[in-house]
Every structure is written in structure tokens, then in C-alpha cells.
Amino acid sequence: MIEEILKKAIGLNAESISKKKVDADVSLRMRECGIKDLDDYIALVERSPEELKRLIDTVTVPETWFFRLPGAFECLEKRLRNTINSDAQQLPFKVLSMPCSTGEEPYSVAMLMYECGLKREDFVIDAIDVNTASLNKARHGVYTLNSFRGVKQRIIDSYFKQSNRIFELEERIRESVNFSRVNVLEMKPPSRDMRYDVIFCRNMLIYFDRESQLKVIDLIERSLKDDGILFSGHSEAGIFFDSSFVPLKVDAGFAFIKKSQVKHEPRQPRISTDNLDLFIPPIICKKTESPKDSAMRRERRKRAESTVIKVSDELSPQIQPEEPQKFENQLRHAEELANSGQLAEAVNLCAECIAHDKLNPKAYCLMGMIQLSSRKYSDAEKFFNKALYLHPDYYEALLGVALTHEHTGNVDAAKAFRNRAGNINQT
């Protein structure tokens, strides 16, 4: 029942964070409310918006830090400098951070704005989250060492006042971000002239059910300028692959532009890409297929899928009935760790899953994504290829290996894998 309440309120898929965590958070709230019976607590949540908000705050506590996944900020800096140097400047430059958590992400954007020479009136940064406690911490702008992972000392010295192990953000940076408590499932897109140049949407969609994911993707598309850029997390990138967005090639990060910005001839987006390395999946023109052709294609895919299942039955280790779910949960947790930047921990979980089931294409694909984010392109390619050996039509793995070839300059190979991915997506 609690899971249904959270799903209705914020679109939360309880399985994405484990039922055990939800149960523990509910037990904590029950103790704090002095309630021993679960039915009594459910009744309280249903009649008290304030208690529902407290429960949401308890359940949704993501981890973040300044300049998390630096590739996204490198891409943003290039876009900013292109905007500043263009003849027709489109200022103010507007950025949305959703969810903003405790503020590290939007404040990183603000510091980058000043690093690029912009003035306060030259940009707008909106930051939204459903967690009231996180927003309160964000507004205070006081952090510990845990929020600084790989941040240059010059940045810390320039924008923070340090006292022992406490770091207080300077006032001009705090005042540069507009924080608001917003439930994205209830959010309305801005008017056309108020849309954003850049939207960060990281570490959120992985917790939503599919219906809520599609709703938020539609919101993002309608909130982003036609030539805008979307930044997602590692494990969320696959969610956008089958949407109205196409990926940009960004080191150690995932970025997307709208499909409407990709022309057939030539294949270039309308945004300025002098300093952006673009990765565009193929534009496939549907051709008329005979019933025989379509049937043959379906049969090939069916055989590929059945082959994976058959080989797995014959060669995979003996697994107890409850273990498949255990390792599925481990993979999901590995995705969360990768999305939060804890790559070493994510690698360890993936390796454990592979050790128990060497024929799991999802584990190999996730391992490839992690290696890709670490710029280990050769290792990433090997893992993607293993995933494709087991599942030749694995869409995300095809795009992943194409991306590794783009990074290493193998244009022909990248094109071939993009074409394979495009053909699968059209069937």
C-alpha cells in the first residue's frame, strides 16, 4: 500500500531502491510519529500531506557532489563559450537542474558561469526537487569534504569559506540559483520564450515506473529549447535512446539533443558544434518490406533470443531459484552506484554478477557503460561486444560500441554499429 502511495505521489518505483529500504524508511517514520501499527500509519499518510512530504523526504535522499561527471560540465563550458563568442548572443543563458538534491549540481553550474566570464544578469539557474530537507540544505550552501571529490583546490579557494572541515559557499553563488520544491509529475512546461538552453536530469528517472518516465521525458522535451542540450546519468541514458532525443558524444558523461535538430542532409544538428563532438544515430528511412522480408527478420530475432536462452540453460552455473532476483537487484544497485559516480563499487557488483552468470548480457553492457564513462574505450568495447555475442540485437550495447568507435576515431565501424542499432529500432 505504501508503495502505491509513493508511486501515485511522485512516480516512485519502489523496486528501484529495494522494498527493504522503503520498509526501513516507513519504520523510521512510524517510530518518529509514535505509531506501532502499519495500517494506522498508512491512514496518517493518506490524510496528512505533511506526513506524506516527510515520508518522501526520507525515501528520496540521493548522493551527489560538486562537478559530478565532469564530462557534462566540459560540454556545458564549450556550449557557453560558443554562446558568448557568437555574433547573436542568446542571453540570459537558462539552465534547469532536476532534481537538484542538496545543491551541488546547480551551484557547480553557477561557478562555471562565472568562470566563463558571465555576469549575474547573463544567466538563470532554476533548481527543483521534491525533497524539502535537501532543498533546505541546498539553500544554506554549507558542505563537508564528502561534496568535494576531485574538485580543483583553486575552485574551493575561490568560491568557499573554509572553517575546519566545513565549507560555506559564498553569497553570490547561493543567490545565483533559484530553488523550488516541485513534483516533476505535476510540473507544467514553460512558455516557448522561457525554455531552457540546458537541462540536467540525472539520478531521477531510474526510480520511476515507465509511465512516469515517459511523462517526464515529454516534459523535458517541451521545456528544452530546440537547440538545447540534455544531460542524463549513466544508467538513465538508455531510457532516452528510444525517445525523441539522440545522443551527443561526451567524455565521461551522457548528453542528448532533440531528434528534430538532426537533418538528413547533411547529418548535422542546427546548434553550433564547432567544439562539440557529435554522435548521431543513423537516420533510417523506412523502406517497404514484403511480408516475406518482415517474417524473415522476425524469425532471425526470435532465433537470436532463443539461442541466448538455450545456451544459458546449458552452460550457466546452477543457480538457486531465489538467486536470479538477487543478482537482478545487484545489477540495479550497480546502475545506481554508476549513476552516482561510485564506479569502483559498481564494477565490483557487475563482476560478481558476471561470475555467477557468465551469460548475462545486461551485466556486460552495464560494465561497458562504466568503462566508457571512465574513458577506457578499449575495455568498454570488449564488454559491449560480449553483450552483443550473447544478445545480437541488444540496442543499448550497439549504441555503446558505436560510441567507443566514435571516440577512437573509427568512423566506419561506428557507422556500421549505428546502422545496426537503427535497423533494430525500426523493427
Image (cartoon, helix red, strand yellow):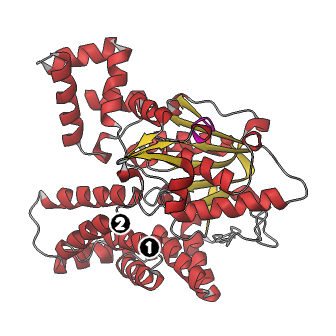
Relative to 43, residue 406 above or below: below
Label annotation for residue 343: 2
Image x and y of residue 253, in percent: 52, 64
Ranked by sequence position, the earlier of labels 1 and 2 is 2
Q: Say whether residue 346 is magenta.
A: no
Label 2 Cα crowd, 10 Å radius (few <14 / some 14-19 / many 20+): many
In this view of the protein, which residue sits in the foreground, 348 or 424?
348
Three-letter amino acid code of the residue under disc 2: Leu
In this view of the protein, which residue sits in the foreground, 112 or 130?
112
Label annotation for residue 390: none
Three-letter amino acid code of the residue under disc 1: Ser
Taking the image as shown, residue 241 lies to the left or right of residue 163, namely right
Relative to 189, residue 355 above or below: below
Label 1: which residue? 374
- Span highlighted in magenta in the image: 173-177
SS class, disc 2: helix
Q: CA distance from mark 1 to mark 2?
A: 8 Å
Using the rendered view, name the quadrant where residue 188 is placed: top right
In this view of the protein, which residue sits in the foreground, 217 or 80?
80
